[in-house]
Image (tube, rainbow, N blue to C red):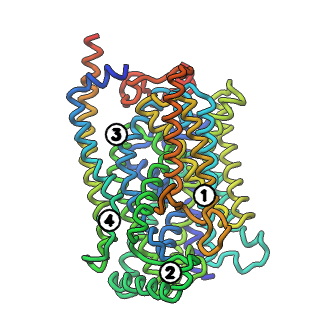
Amino acid sequence: MNGVVVGVFTFLFLLVTVMGFAAARWRRAESLDHLDEWGLGGRSFGTFIAWFLIGGDIYTAYTFIAVPATLYAGSVVGFFAVPYTIIIYPMIFLFLPRLWSVSHRHGYVTPADFVAGRYDSRPLALAVAVTGILATMPYIALQLVGMQVVLEVMGIGTENDNWFVQDLPLFLAFVVLAAYTYSSGLRAPALIAFVKDTLIYVVIIVAVIYLPSQVGGWDSIFTAANDSFDTFNAENADAIAAGAAQPKGMIPPPAAHWAYASLALGSALALFMYPHSITGVLSTRSRTVIRRNAALLPAYSFLLGLLALLGFVAIAAGIEVENAQASVPQLFEQEFTPWFAGVAFAAIVIGALVPAAIMSIAAANLWTRNIYKAFLKPGATPKEEATQSKLISLLVKFGALIFVLTLPNQFAINLQLLGGVWILQTMPAIVIGLYTRWLHRWALLAGWAVGFLYGTWLAYGVPVVGEPGSHFGGPLVKFPGTETNVYIALVAFLANLLVAVVLTVVLRAMKVDAGVDSTEADDYVADVGDEGVDPDLDPLQTARA
Amino acid sequence: MAERSSRSRGTSRALWILVLVLLAPAVVVPLLVPLYDRAEPTLWGFPFFFWFQFAMIVAAAALTLTAFLISAKADERMRAERRARRAGR
């Protein structure tokens, strides 16, 4: 434990804490006792804030730890994070403005609100809401895993044998996060996102300029990584041939092309189905803000790509760690002067707080709107809704905390893998629903169930390399009937779509009631200033109208 | 309902098609791994596989930005068309 590192880290953390509480007064609303205000920041965020907020959503602390870790570990598909974050923006550009418009016309706060209105189906909306909550929880837990890795490398708490003292820093950080999310709502992460991203940008820019010069330039970094992988493959040739070890590499061989592309596509499609990304998008002021951001957000992709390469830098710098996730924090600790290492660690931990806050708010909104109000207390007032959401956001966060503290971290990682598979199954109802209502509500529900169960079963059947009979070993399966590895979420999604289409034909032929669509074509292109689009509209009244 | 509004979108429709044409390569090219799964030629020490993907980020951003500018125009026209339609009703 280094005093300077911890001092700088603590200072920045406290700074952010003060900002989190002060955020309640920022762009002050008359009252935060309203879900639009607490949960969507008054729906008033412009390009600048939205850029930070959506960026903070997509590029989480776990991304910053896990992506370089996969490259450090020599996974040939590890760099898929880059094509994934390239293809996501054109999709955001096309799909999400439609969701924004229909949500602003009808006061929808969550994707499940939209599904309920579009398909007139409470079971389908419930399925979307439950999937969203289930997929978000392990995501929050992973943010904690990211924080834990950094705290461990800093040596905070690890010198004590008592588990309580060991985890106390993590616990404290989380209590602080929970307290200001509770009092400030979405404004807190939006304001903190400025600090987070500024710090991350500074750290990464310094890291990618300074660190390569310390280890002999990019040329020798790639050579060092390649040599290290070649050595590993030569030493473990027998185990690799027997399937007990994974060969390492930098560039996906032809056999891994589909894996690389399907991971990128599946993750991109899944990402904006996550409730927290939709929350970020709905909090913007207009459709234009979303489109403009789709053009500006790739700046983060560039950052992410450079950051991923730090995994190779760690190899070149001779970092040897048991847990690949510690490679980049360890690299910072070894190569940076102490005060800057403190800044770097603070950047990652604060980077965990922002998405964790947004995710817990999004999960809480789903609960309140689509379970509490839809099933438990239909007559809830706006104030009661806001109170519910605040309480649930606390519950969700502490659930994630207990999860991380009591269960092995691998469990959170497995569940995150499943979360990606699950959330993609809500896509037909949401994205296809934005364009056409042809798919029947019961067919969508059946497709969702098939995709959900099939995907879970597939993931369960993947053994960890070298451990036959183990489960949740990775995100890839052989595509049915072929020898090609493909992302599980995409396979399950195809099954989902197939069921939805076939059943729609059957149900339509049988003339099963398709329900009443409460939206109309014009709703999907409405923008601020149009008739019926009041940015400050009470969502409850419009939902009823 | 849906049919009428899509038919009356006439002039803005051409612009929307242009937007789609601009965005399509940004989604499709990154998925064509065989295009870039090689180490040579290197650029500033970066194998082709890596620098090509960085170049794609820049290219995709440029395409999306162009699409944004066109979509703003298309949105404007679409709104004018809808106003005209309402007035004519």
- Name the quadrant of the N terminus of chain A: bottom right
Q: Which residue is mark 3?
A: A288
Q: Which residue is mark 1?
A: A459
The verdict on a common chain for dots 1 and 3 is yes
Could you tell me how far apart the alpha carbons at marks 4 and 3 are, in whole angstroms? Answer: 35 Å
Tag 3 or tag 1, which sits nearer the N-term?
A: 3
The verdict on a common chain for dots 4 and 3 is no
Residue B34 is labelled as 4
Q: Residues within 10 Å of mark 1 (few under 14, many from 20)?
A: many
Tag 3 or tag 2, which sits nearer the N-term?
A: 3
Label 1 residue SS: helix
User: Which residue is found at the position 64% from the left and 52% from the top?
Assistant: A137
User: Which residue is found at the position 47% from the left and 78% from the top?
Assistant: A248
Label 4 residue SS: helix
| Mark in the foreground, 1 or 3 | 1
| Mark in the foreground, 4 or 2 | 4
Q: Tag 2, which chain? A: A
Q: Amino acid at mark 4?
A: Pro
Q: Nearer the viewer, residue A448 or A284?
A: A448
